[in-house]
Image (cartoon, rainbow, N blue to C red):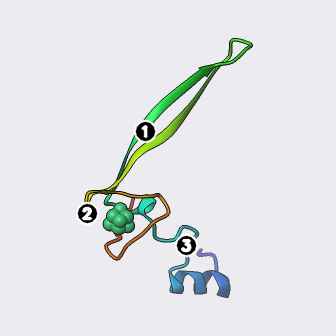
């Protein structure tokens, strides 16, 4: 048995609706280096986080931003 989709859900499918617009961050030509950071707080607890560095476009080989885009954008799939 298949569940019937609402008209809104079908319209979204037909229009190619998605919550993330085309940007360097979801482009297959984007690369970055992930740097791990840590900090020992006053109570001895160690906090860990990551910072994205060296954001680059591999087509033009230039520095870019996660939310930038261009005409050569290709969506990363899977
Ligand atoms: S500049 Fe264009 S091709 Fe390069 S990563 Fe961004 S969207 Fe992709």
Instruction: Pick the residue in front: 42 or 10.
Output: 42
What element does badge 3 sit on?
Answer: loop
Give coordinates of residue 52: x percent, y percent.
Answer: 46, 43
When the figure is inspected, residue 49 is found, relative to residue 68, above or below; the finding is: above
Nearest to viewer (mark 2 / mark 1): 2
Task: Locate residue 71: give its quadrant.
Answer: bottom left
**Which residue is labeled 2 in the image?**
60
**Which residue is labeled 3 in the image?**
18
When the figure is inspected, residue 38 is found, relative to residue 16, above or below; the finding is: above
**Which residue is labeled 1 in the image?**
34
Give coordinates of residue 11: x percent, y percent.
Answer: 59, 87
At 59% across and 74% down in the image, what residue appears?
A: 1
Q: Residues within 10 Å of mark 3 (few under 14, many from 20)?
A: few
Give coordinates of residue 62: x percent, y percent.
Answer: 30, 57
Marks 3 and 2, Cα distance to the nearest angstrom? 27 Å
Task: Locate residue 59: give its quadrant.
Answer: bottom left
At 58% across and 69% down in the image, what residue appears?
A: 19
Indicate if the residue with disc 2 has its beta carbon within 8 Å of ligand 1: yes
């Amino acid at each position: 048995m298949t569940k019937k989709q609402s008209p809104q859900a079908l319209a979204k499918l037909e229009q190619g609706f998605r919550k993330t617009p085309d940007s360097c961050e979801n482009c297959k030509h984007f690369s970055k280096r992930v740097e791990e950071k840590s900090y020992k707080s006053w109570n001895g607890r160690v906090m860990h986080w990551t910072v994205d560095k060296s954001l680059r476009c591999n087509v033009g080989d230039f520095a870019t931003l996660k939310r930038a885009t261009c005409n050569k954008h290709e969506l990363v799939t899977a």
